[in-house]
Image (cartoon, coloured by chain):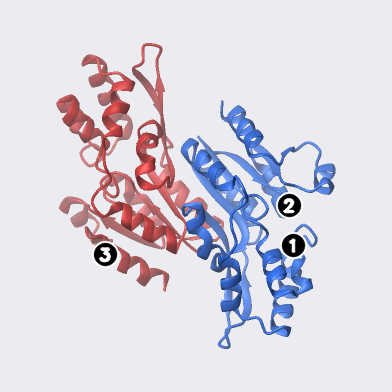
Chain colours: A blue, B red
Amino acid sequence: MYVLCSDLESVLLPELWVEIAKQTKIEELKLTTRDIADMNLLMQKRISALKENGVSFKDLQEVVSRSEPLEGAVDFLRWARKKMPVIILSDAFWEFVSPIAHKMDYPTVFCNSLEIDEEGFISGYKLREDGKRRTVEALQQTGMKVIAMGDSYNDVRMIQKAEKGIFFNASEKIKTEFPSVQATSDYEELKDIILETVR
Amino acid sequence: MYVLCSDLESVLLPELWVEIAKQTKIEELKLTTRDIADMNLLMQKRISALKENGVSFKDLQEVVSRSEPLEGAVDFLRWARKKMPVIILSDAFWEFVSPIAHKMDYPTVFCNSLEIDEEGFISGYKLREDGKRRTVEALQQTGMKVIAMGDSYNDVRMIQKAEKGIFFNASEKIKTEFPSVQATSDYEELKDIILETVR
């Protein structure tokens, strides 16, 4: 039995931190895992920038809740969920994903979580270290075959571990770096690749 | 992060084979994992009974597609999926679950699969041997905490392995046999148990 493990941001949703950066106009928040592969370093930068600019967790949730899934993403997700079990593996934070989960019909999402201090600022976070790859491996150990898809450096390990790995909306840089991974930015083509794999 | 691993039949859906038995009027098909814990033995009985009575796979899918989720199940599932990732772990067959998945908003379901012969009869099946327990363990290995719920003998191992195990709609027999497992047959009480666990 195949399971689809999909990244979330840039694949189904916009990059949430980029959305936050746009609306808060804090330049440093535009950086994503595409720019800095080290998630801890990236998060430290984000937390400092938010505190310096007085942006609370509540402000952030409000900003994030206005985000909309990428065009075609909801239809793709519905299609995929009819075909096979789908688990979204994301380095986003549950606290940001849950206010927009209804826009995707509440998919199953494994992700990180935030810690909020008494003043209402993000003070820390819990990362599922190498959680994407570890989840793919764990599913394989139970006899599942995995199709893994993502756009970024933090997806490469799960993509390489999966029976079938796919880059979706990936940058030219990463596609050139990992030329053996099939790549597309089109949901219809993505469906074809998935159908071909499970056949 | 907690994940909810829930059984399907008798917990969210009626027992599909009992539904099939009712509509095909084949008495042997009324047996479930509540009666016979050995899934292979149970399936052999079912396949023989279907062939003897000339009931094809297509007939079965039609019967199954008329099934409705248990009263309150869809609301419970929606509630749970807002709170945490949910994976349904079932010994049902994908081919029977998929025609009714839309009635539950396409949850993530890990289950078994059927083999159909050229004449359109069920000829075999692929079981995820001890798949429920193995999936719970695999999720725990990736750092997730698991709430596992089910009604029957084939749920006991995952229930015992989980950080929190719950019997839902279980028989008096099994509740007496495993008295340390918290039990309820009420979705509101179930929500309370889950909330208490994740707090």
In percent of width and height, residue A47 lies at 70, 77
Return the residue at label 1.
A32
- Tell me the element at label 2: loop
Nearest the viewer among A38 and A59 is: A59
Q: Is residue A21 left or right of residue A117?
A: right
Q: What amino acid type should be assigned to the residue bearing mark 1?
A: Thr
- Tell me the element at label 3: helix
Nearest the viewer among A31 and A43 is: A31
In percent of width and height, residue B93 lies at 37, 34
Q: What amino acid type should be assigned to the residue bearing mark 3?
A: Glu
For residue A152, the mark is 2
Specify few, some or many for label 2: CA neighbours under 10 Å numbering under 14, 14-19, or 20 or more.
Answer: many
Q: Is residue A153 left or right of residue B41?
A: right
Residue at x-position 60% and y-position 45%:
A72
State whether residue B124 is above or below residue A135: above
Gap in Å between the C-alphas at discs 1 and 2? 9 Å
Residue at x-position 37% and y-position 61%:
B79
